[in-house]
Amino acid sequence: MEQKDFEHMYQALTQDGRKGHLMTFDAPTGSGKTYSVTHFFSGASATRAEFSCFFL
């Protein structure tokens, strides 16, 4: 996954202003999903005051 993919997902999750969205990722084990998501969330929370998330 690339940074633009995460930006697109962020826009999809926040465009209507509601909270409580769920997104799943269909990718094989070992493809870097957890690392990529936490890296994006860390950057987003550092640069966007309105950003909050819960990651399982």
Image: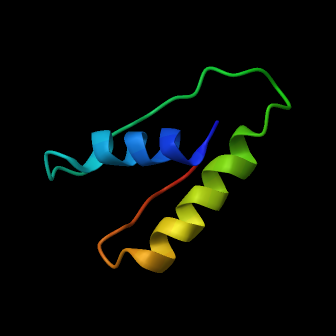
Residue 27 visible in the picture? yes
Q: Position of residue 48 (x, y in %)?
A: 37, 74
**Residue drawn at point x = 50 percent, y = 38 percent:** 5
**Residue drawn at point x = 56 percent, y = 48 percent:** 3
Q: Quadrant of residue 12?
A: top left
Question: In what quadrant of the picture does the N terminus appear?
Answer: top right
The answer to whether 13 is drawn above or below residue 25 in the figure is below
Q: Position of residue 27 (x, y in %)?
A: 69, 22
Q: Position of residue 7 (x, y in %)?
A: 43, 48
| In the displayed structure image, the side of residue 22 where residue 41 appears, left or right | right
Residue 20 visible in the picture? no
Work out which residue is located at the far right of the displayed protein and give it.
30
Q: Position of residue 24 (x, y in %)?
A: 51, 29
| In the displayed structure image, the side of residue 33 where residue 13 appears, left or right | left
| In the displayed structure image, the side of residue 11 where residue 4 appears, left or right | right
| In the displayed structure image, the side of residue 40 where residue 51 appears, left or right | left
The answer to whether 39 is drawn above or below residue 24 in the figure is below
